[in-house]
Image (tube, rainbow, N blue to C red):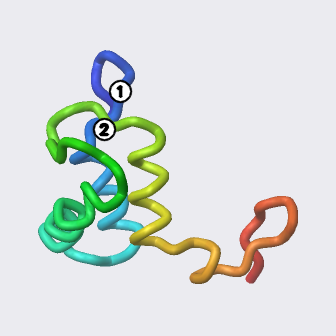
Amino acid sequence: FVRETGLVSLEHGLEVVSRMTGNALDSVRAEANKQWQGWGFSRFDPQRPATRKELAVLLDYFADPFNRWEVDWEGNWMP
């Protein structure tokens, strides 16, 4: 899902979030669109390249990794 330019589209980021969380892609896209400006971003366009910050916010919001999985001080998931 990396474009020829080496960039990841916002749509592909949404697909990753959908797969990670088990949520339907349409519902992830709709919720991201709803929250987008509240997160401080100006334009929700899934076809454009995503920034690292946008991908980080999406993953944090939907996957909530630090509350969903226990992580040690080195960042490893603990069983």
Residue of label 1: 7
Local secondary structure at mark 1: loop
Q: Nearer the viewer, mark 1 or mark 2?
A: 1
Dot 2, crowdedness within 10 Å: few (<14), some or many (≥20)?
Answer: few
Name the spot of residue 2 as percent of width and height, x first: 34, 31
- Residue at 77% in and 64% down: 76
**Residue nearest the viewer, comparing 19 with 7:** 7
Residue of label 2: 1
Quarter holding the C terminus is bottom right
Residue 43 occupies which quadrant of the picture?
Answer: top left
Residue 78 occupies which quadrant of the picture?
Answer: bottom right
Q: Which mark is residue 59?
A: none
Q: From the viewer's perspective, is 27 left or right of 56?
A: left
- Name the amino acid type tagged 1: Leu
- Residue at 15% in and 37% down: 47
**Residue nearest the viewer, comparing 33 with 65:** 33
Label 2 near label 1: C-beta < 8 Å?
no
- Residue 56, relative to residue 60: is it above or below? above
